[in-house]
Image (cartoon, rainbow, N blue to C red):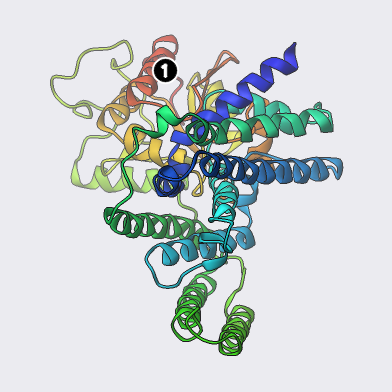
């Protein structure tokens, strides 16, 4: 019975992935194809739905096989772990970039987007299914974390892992499949028309935005020269694809098309060999260090600014709370209007808990769209910063952009295999694990205030 509950959670998690930020760039592609084939025959729509579902399931079964193989080899596995590897990120940037160029009309991807005569572009639906699956893996969602943790855990049998990943894929594909087989749902979609060309171009810009996001992740994983050279490769890739369409399109003879495509392929291979590098960054200063808050304190002290824990640190008129009375002097948790995150450090967590100070840990990564959405919409807000200042909690960020076994182990202890994950470690040895997926500011504030009421700032042991 336990397996059936995990399968249900996996299906619901896959279903919810459809509205997660990481999948939004491909939602436009799915809507476009629904509209494009909405006026077609019933059988054609159904085949498109089945082709898309087959692509999704193919990707998730392949991912499950990879997880099983890695786990058999003794490796630690986690949801979205492939995004920690620069070669995979480079491939994702190039793939999304190419899809965007195709939507903008730089070239026509005749094989997958229109298919051979009689196939009516079914291959496009299959490719879109694979693409949507790959794009969904950086995100976590309610129900998904529980199922994924079991599927990725060492205690799961290989067939259980395969079944759970299959259920996640089926959940992800189910809305498209439902629309394909239920004509009443398809009737609410707009009719095909000239507006679709504009929509396709807008879709291309959406995909280019996704490529920019992925490149930002890649940039954080490699050296600056390597990321700059990769931009040059993307330019050559775009020119080569344009040249194939312009000089070797379907209006030209077979010999010319093959010649142009052969030259373009050779140029792209040569450019890739010379311009793609995964050199690690050297000497990069960490984003967050323990020294930064202390320097800020010293700077504020010189100009006479109030520090956290001193009168005037909280805005006048703030409502009195149990945590606002005489908090102990310590490093500020907010500097220049932004949260002063401490770098993830298990030893410091233990030290702060011994001082009766709760620690809020944000498990995040540059490639996690949900993480970035929460950070911008819910965490880096005035309400969140205010409760941090009053409560005395230490904000700590665990950056999982690159491989980190320690962070992976701590996530495993939480019963999570993916991010985002938010937890408040309490001095009494307990912890408060927040919900998965997107979290509102009010939810964060509620949990922070609960920790502050239990362990008030004026009872915490001061730093020496």
Rendered view: 73 above or below 96: above
Rendered view: 460 above or below 231: above
388 vs 124, nearest the viewer: 124
185 vs 362, nearest the viewer: 185
Q: Is residue 291 left or right of residue 194?
A: right
246 vs 37, nearest the viewer: 37
What residue is at 57 percent from the left and 63 percent from the top? 117
**Is residue 421 something one can see in this rendering?**
no
**Is residue 110 something one can see in this rendering?**
yes
Question: What residue sits right under mark 1 in the picture?
Answer: 447
Q: Quadrant of the N terminus?
A: top right
Q: Is residue 321 left or right of residue 224?
A: left
What residue is at 84 percent from the left and 29 percent from the top? 157
**Whole-percent x and y of residue 436?**
51, 26
What residue is at 27 percent from the left and 27 percent from the top? 383
**Whole-percent x and y of residue 66?**
76, 46
Residue 200 found in image quarter: bottom left
């Amino acid at each position: 019975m336990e397996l059936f509950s995990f399968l249900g959670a996996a299906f619901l998690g896959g279903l919810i992935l459809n509205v997660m930020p990481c999948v939004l760039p491909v939602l436009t592609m799915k809507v476009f194809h629904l509209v494009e084939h909405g006026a077609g025959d019933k059988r054609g729509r159904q085949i498109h739905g089945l082709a898309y579902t087959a692509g999704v399931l193919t990707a998730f079964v392949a991912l499950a096989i990879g997880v099983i193989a890695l786990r058999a080899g003794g490796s630690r596995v986690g949801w979205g772990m492939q995004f920690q590897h620069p070669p995979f990120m480079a491939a994702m940037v190039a793939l999304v970039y190419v899809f965007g160029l195709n939507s903008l009309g730089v070239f026509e991807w005749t094989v997958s987007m229109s298919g051979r005569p009689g196939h009516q572009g079914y291959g496009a639906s299959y490719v879109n299914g694979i693409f949507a699956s790959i794009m969904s893996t950086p995100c976590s969602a309610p129900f998904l974390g529980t199922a994924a943790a079991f599927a990725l855990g060492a205690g799961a049998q290989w067939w259980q892992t395969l079944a759970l990943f299959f259920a996640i894929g089926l959940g992800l594909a189910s809305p498209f499949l439902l629309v394909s087989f239920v004509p009443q749902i398809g009737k609410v979609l707009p009719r095909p028309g000239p507006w679709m060309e504009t929509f396709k171009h807008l879709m291309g810009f959406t995909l280019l935005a996704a490529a920019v996001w992925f490149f930002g992740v890649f940039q954080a994983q490699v050296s600056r020269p390597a990321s700059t050279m990769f931009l040059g490769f993307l330019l050559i890739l775009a020119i080569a694809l344009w040249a194939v369409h312009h000089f070797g399109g379907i209006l030209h003879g077979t010999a010319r098309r093959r010649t142009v495509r052969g030259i373009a392929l050779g140029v792209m291979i040569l450019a890739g060999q010379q311009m793609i590098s995964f050199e690690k960054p050297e000497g990069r200063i960490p984003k967050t260090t323990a020294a930064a808050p202390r320097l800020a304190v010293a700077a504020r002290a010189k100009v006479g600014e109030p520090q956290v824990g001193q009168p005037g640190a909280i805005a006048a008129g703030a409502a009195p709370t149990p945590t606002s009375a005489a908090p102990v002097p310590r490093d500020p948790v907010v500097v220049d209007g932004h949260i002063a995150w401490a770098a993830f450090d298990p030893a410091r967590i233990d030290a702060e808990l011994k001082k009766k100070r709760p620690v809020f840990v944000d498990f995040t990564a540059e490639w996690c769209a949900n993480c970035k959405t929460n950070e911008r919409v819910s965490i880096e807000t005035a309400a969140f910063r205010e409760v941090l200042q009053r409560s005395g909690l230490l904000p700590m960020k665990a950056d999982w952009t690159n491989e980190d076994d320690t962070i992976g182990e701590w996530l495993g202890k939480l019963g999570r295999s993916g991010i985002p994950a938010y937890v408040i470690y309490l001095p009494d040895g307990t912890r408060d694990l927040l919900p998965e997926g997107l979290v509102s500011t009010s939810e964060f504030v509620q949990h922070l205030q609960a920790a502050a009421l239990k362990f008030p700032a004026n009872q915490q042991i001061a730093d020496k």
